[in-house]
Image: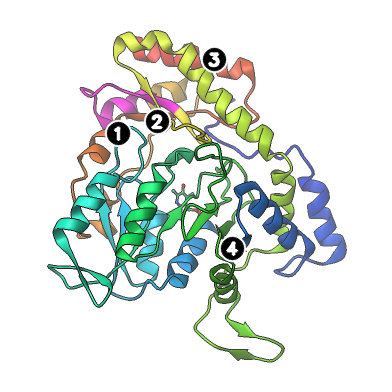
């Protein structure tokens, strides 16, 4: 039996609420669970409201559209992210400008963004343009990598200074805190994912959150076909991105357990850091973790002299022993569809991703399995 990397923990009211959807026939986009799920997500993130979507990707697409990202414009985003961040930008017809992360937080490097804007962009008629291409900079989109929150005060004032929207890909950040507070008000819009491997799952799903009620109302409008009720009137090109009641039924049962799930995720991170401490002699370090991070994934980082091949061989030897371990996000600039995307310095991303090994971190992992993983990782590293 394999100890999986990250599987859903469906030990709560999931089955009961799903049965209720079937019993009441509310399986589609109208239903009490969607509304309840939105309230729970808004409450848990300190947002004025949440708009539930069919996925994190569609949520980001809707959020970028709502803040005015258009065809041929540029969105600044880290190269070290899941490809959905870049895809959602492409779905707007826009272009991701790929930038590096900083090695402390594994999130978008603020200093680099500021430098690139100051040196390579200019303001005309109150709008920010990339000088060489003449394309408008339509948004900055940091990513809360692993549930780490970077210095958002600085991103906020930079975005305000140049009058550009700040949207966050907070796909894996449910439960994270920033200076002890919720993160729902740190950007114009932030987007969560409830995909199967996230800390809280709906099977698939997402949510757009924020602190501007009008903007969120607009997101709700465009994610539900931009219909003006009661007749078949539509006032803009909308999307069919609404979450269904079936997804939300699972989500409500999951959100009932969010505090314990986050606590467990943080304990798993702590466990690996302490049980594998002896590997520091071998140069092994651990995943970046900011204050208040929600620790979506945990694992180890090999020292600089190692390569992707070393990481892969450790993963496959662990697999033979019954432990599912995996490499992590390959940067976007190395992906086929984005090989020509504009990029600034991306060297931290490029060096880091090759040496990351994600270890099992499901919220229902047993202490015995954690010990087994830890012992096998030590064995694997010692043979390096
Ligand atoms: C999971 C994830 C997404 C995509 O969310 P989906 O719900 O799978 O569409 C986007 N960005 C990041 C950083 C993610 O981790």
Please tell me whether mark 4 or mark 3 is closer to you in this view.
4
Look at 28% across and 74% down and name the residue there.
Answer: 126
Above/below status of 258 relative to 299: below
Mark sitting earlier along the chain (1/2): 1
User: What kind of element bears circle 3?
Assistant: helix
| Magenta-tinted stretch | 299-314
Describe the element under mark 1 as helix, strand or loop.
Answer: loop
How far across and down, in percent of the image, does residue 32 sit?
79, 62
Instruction: Give the residue displayed 44% in from the left and 54% down from the top.
Output: 168
Task: For marks 3 and 1, give the one nearer the viewer.
Answer: 1
Q: Quadrant of residue 365?
A: top right
**Residue under circle 4?**
53
Q: Between label 3 and label 2, give the one nearer the viewer.
A: 2
* Mark closer to the chain start, 4 or 2: 4
Give the Cα separation between the discs numbered 3 and 1.
30 Å
Q: Quadrant of residue 197?
A: top right
Q: Which mark is residue 55?
A: none
For the residue carrying disc 3, how many other residues have a C-alpha within 10 Å: few (<14), some (14-19), or many (20+)?
Answer: some
Give the Cα separation between the discs numbered 1 and 2: 8 Å
């Amino acid at each position: 039996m394999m100890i999986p990397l990250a599987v859903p923990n469906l030990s709560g009211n999931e089955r009961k609420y799903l049965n209720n959807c079937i019993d009441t026939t509310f399986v589609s986009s109208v239903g009490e669970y969607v509304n309840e799920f939105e309230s729970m997500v808004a409450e848990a993130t300190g947002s004025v409201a949440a708009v539930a979507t069919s996925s994190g990707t569609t949520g980001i697409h809707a959020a970028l559209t709502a803040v005015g990202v258009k065809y041929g414009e540029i969105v600044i985003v880290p190269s070290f992210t899941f490809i959905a961040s870049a895809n959602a930008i492409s779905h707007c017809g826009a272009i991701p400008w790929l930038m590096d992360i900083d090695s402390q937080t594994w999130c978008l490097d603020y200093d680099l963004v500021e430098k690139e804007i100051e040196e390579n962009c200019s303001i005309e008629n109150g709008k920010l343009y990339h000088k060489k291409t003449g394309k408008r900079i339509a948004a900055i989109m940091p990513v809360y990598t692993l549930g780490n929150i970077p210095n958002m005060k600085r991103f906020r004032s930079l975005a305000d200074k140049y009058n550009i929207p700040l949207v966050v890909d907070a796909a894996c950040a449910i439960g994270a805190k920033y200076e002890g507070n919720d993160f729902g008000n740190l950007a114009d819009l932030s987007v969560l994912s409830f995909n199967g491997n996230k800390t809280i799952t709906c099977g698939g799903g997402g949510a757009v959150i924020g602190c501007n009620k009008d903007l969120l109302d607009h997101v709700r409008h465009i994610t539900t076909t931009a219909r003006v009720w009661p007749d078949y009137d539509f006032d803009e090109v909308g999307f069919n991105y609404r979450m269904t009641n079936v997804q939300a039924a699972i989500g409500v049962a999951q959100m009932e357990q969010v505090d314990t799930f986050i606590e467990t995720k943080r304990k798993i991170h702590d466990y690996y850091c302490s049980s594998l401490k002896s590997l520091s002699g071998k140069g092994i370090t651990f995943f970046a973790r900011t204050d208040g991070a929600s620790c979506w994934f945990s694992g180890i980082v090999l020292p600089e002299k190692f390569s992707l091949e070393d990481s892969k061989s450790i993963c496959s030897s662990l697999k033979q022993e019954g432990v599912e371990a995996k490499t992590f996000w390959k940067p976007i600039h190395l992906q086929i569809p984005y090989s020509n995307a504009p990029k600034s310095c991306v060297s931290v991303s490029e060096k880091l991703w090759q040496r990351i090994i994600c270890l099992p971190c499901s919220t229902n992992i047993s202490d015995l399995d954690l010990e087994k993983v830890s012992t096998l990782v030590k064995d694997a590293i010692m043979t390096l």
